[in-house]
Image (cartoon, rainbow, N blue to C red):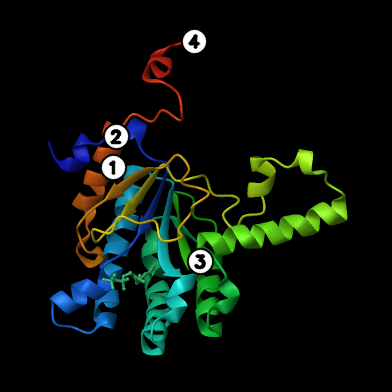
């Protein structure tokens, strides 16, 4: 039986979030400059998106550019922005063919004008696709998102006279940039780093975490299937006991 066939399609994660790490190290290993590593990071983006859509995963979120990435050398930032524009443009037919909707969240006002325009165009063109949504976290960090939500929430509390007692998780999360996206059941990080790096901290409260040594440019369908199979072996208890989970009431 192939890896793909071993996956229980009735117990798929609805949302998979991925920290695509290791492009720089992949480039170094192959004697290239860092930006070549980013270029080789595009193929797994396509492969993972197609594989998830085929399986029936409904949401995939990719950490494409963090708030902290703005501090990289300007040449690398520019190369990444250019790559994003080119890739988004080039991938529209693949998104259409696979019925995938594109979305983006983060401090998008910081993106260069041409990048924002290309992104908005692709979001608009793919807006009626319904098989899966591919979310790009761009100029994103979790602390930025939570602070931004807190500011918006505080303003709303003042103008609508909301009492502190009325505040709950549901109300607060309605101010997050990710407000309409279900929490990920599975988060994957490549390249052997065991960190979350300011990604979806609020949303991963109960997510299963999967780490692989594979550098992002080498990540492929089989790696994805392995991550899903590992997820399916785990018991998700949400703070309950195993016995409570097996009770059928
Ligand atoms: C992390 O590797 C990767 C990034 C900061 C950029 C990810 C971008 C892509 C894969 C390009 C295409 C993406 C889309 C969504 C169109 P790193 O540079 O931190 O690697 P290192 O830790 O080895 O230095």
Q: Regarding mark 1 in the picture, which secondary structure is present there?
A: helix
Q: State the residue at coordinates (26%, 45%).
A: 227
Residue 228 badge: 1
Per the image, the residue denoted by label 3 is 140
Per the image, the residue denoted by label 4 is 249
Residue 166 left/right relative to 48: right
Residue 138 badge: none
Instruction: Looking at the image, tell me whether mark 4 or mark 2 is earlier in sequence order.
Output: 2
Which residue occupies the foreground of this view, 120 or 92? 120
Instruction: Looking at the image, tell me whether mark 1 or mark 3 is earlier in sequence order.
Output: 3
Instruction: Looking at the image, tell me whether mark 4 or mark 1 is earlier in sequence order.
Output: 1
Residue 168 appears anywhere in the view: yes
Residue 8 appears anywhere in the view: no
Which residue occupies the foreground of this view, 71 or 10? 71
Q: Which of the two discs, 2 and 3, sits closer to the camera?
A: 3
Q: Which of the two discs, 1 and 3, sits closer to the camera?
A: 3
Instruction: Looking at the image, tell me whether mark 3 or mark 4 is earlier in sequence order.
Output: 3
Quarter for ligand 1? bottom left
Residue 222 drawn at (x, y percent): 19, 50
Dot 1 and dot 3 residues touching (CB under 8 Å): no
Distance between the alpha carbons at the discs numbered 2 and 3: 29 Å
Residue 210 drawn at (x, y percent): 30, 47
Q: Residues within 10 Å of mark 4 (few under 14, many from 20)?
A: few
Per the image, the residue denoted by label 2 is 232
Dot 4 and dot 2 residues touching (CB under 8 Å): no
Q: Which of the two discs, 3 and 4, sits closer to the camera?
A: 3
Quadrant in which residue 158 is drawn:
bottom right
For label 2, being within 8 Å of ligand 1 is answered no
Distance between the alpha carbons at the discs numbered 1 and 3: 25 Å
């Amino acid at each position: 039986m192939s890896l793909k066939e071993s996956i229980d399609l009735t117990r798929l994660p609805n949302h998979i979030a991925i920290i695509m790490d290791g492009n720089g190290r992949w480039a170094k290993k192959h004697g290239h400059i860092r930006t070549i590593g980013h270029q080789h990071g595009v193929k797994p983006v396509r492969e993972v998106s197609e594989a998830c859509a085929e399986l029936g995963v409904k949401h995939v979120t990719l950490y494409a550019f963090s708030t902290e990435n703005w501090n990289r050398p300007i040449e690398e930032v520019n190369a990444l922005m250019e790559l994003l524009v080119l890739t988004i443009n080039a991938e529209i037919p693949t998104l259409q063919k696979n019925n995938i909707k594109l979305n983006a969240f983060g401090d998008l006002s910081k993106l260069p004008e041409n990048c924002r325009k290309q992104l908005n165009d692709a979001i608009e063109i793919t807006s009626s696709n319904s098989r899966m949504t591919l979310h790009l976290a761009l100029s994103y960090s979790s602390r930025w998102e939570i602070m931004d939500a807190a500011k918006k929430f505080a303003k709303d509390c003042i103008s609508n006279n909301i009492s502190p007692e009325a505040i709950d998780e549901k109300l607060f999360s309605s101010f997050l940039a990710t407000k309409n996206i279900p929490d990920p059941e599975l988060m994957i990080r490549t390249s052997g780093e065991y960190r979350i790096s300011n990604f979806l901290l609020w949303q991963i409260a109960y997510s299963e975490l999967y780490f692989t040594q594979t550098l992002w440019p080498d990540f492929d369908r089989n790696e994805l299937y392995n991550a899903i199979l590992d997820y399916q072996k785990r018991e998700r208890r949400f703070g309950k006991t195993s016995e409570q989970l097996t009770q059928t009431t």
